[in-house]
Image (tube, rainbow, N blue to C red):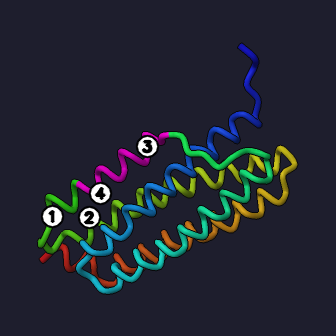
Amino acid sequence: MADKTLNDLFHDTLKDIYYAERKILKSLPKMARAAQSPELKAAFEKHKDQTEGQIERLQQVFEIIGKAPRGKTCDAIEGILAEGDEIMEEYKGSPALDAGLLAAAQAVEHYEITRYGTLKRWANELGMKDAAKLLDETLQEESQTDLDLTTIADAGVNDNAKA
């Protein structure tokens, strides 16, 4: 078996986040429908639009490395999204639903932030400046989404969940 290199790891991780983004894109409308807070609903809808652009940027990164855009099953995102589904089911109609949705969404964001941060560092290490720029653009969006979700939580969602 040939030794694997950072290039191989970069490609595998790129396939992982590509799969994850496509799964997230499918789950965001369901989360938006479940959200009770208009601000949270709007945040999920905004992030759906952003995710579409993030998938396009990932496709550009695949093009840069000369590979077809393909996903590889990401068990981590499967688990995080399953927890979100569980929250939607168990807390439906309750005051704590939005707080649970927010927590699930932030778990997704934190996963994405770690992946994009790592991929950006590796792209720089491998001399792929254009790929690093695309990955950084998404990293900044994911970080901002996380901050926006925290603001929504602090602006009342968590207080409402105590009711």
Q: In the rendered structure, which segment of residues is drawn in magenta? A: 73-85
Q: Nearer the viewer, mark 4 or mark 2?
A: 4
Tell me the element at label 1. loop
Q: For mark 2, does the 10 Å Cα neighbourhood hold few (<14), some (14 to 19), or many (20 or more) residues?
A: many
| Residue 57 visible somewhere in the drawing | yes
- Which numbered disc covers residue 153? none
Residues at marks 4 and 2, CA–CA distance in whole angstroms: 8 Å
Q: Is residue 134 left or right of residue 34?
A: right
In the depicted view, which residue is nearer to us: 41 or 149? Answer: 41
Give yes or no for residue 112 being in the magenta stretch: no
Sequence-earlier tag: 3 or 2: 3
Q: Is residue 29 above or below residue 46?
A: above
Q: Residue furthest front?
A: 68
Residue type at mark 2? Gly
Residue ID for mark 1: 91
Residue ID for mark 4: 84
Residue type at mark 4? Gly
The residue sitting at 16% across, 59% down in the picture is 89
The residue sitting at 77% across, 63% down in the picture is 133
Q: Are marks 1 and 2 in contact (CB under 8 Å)?
A: yes
Residue ID for mark 2: 100
- Which numbered disc covers residue 76? 3
Residues at marks 1 and 2, CA–CA distance in whole angstroms: 8 Å
Q: Nearer the viewer, mark 3 or mark 2?
A: 3
* Res 102 → quadrant: bottom left
Q: Is residue 74 left or right of residue 101?
A: right
Residues at marks 3 and 2, CA–CA distance in whole angstroms: 18 Å
Sequence-earlier tag: 1 or 2: 1
Residues at marks 1 and 4, CA–CA distance in whole angstroms: 10 Å
Residue type at mark 3? Ala
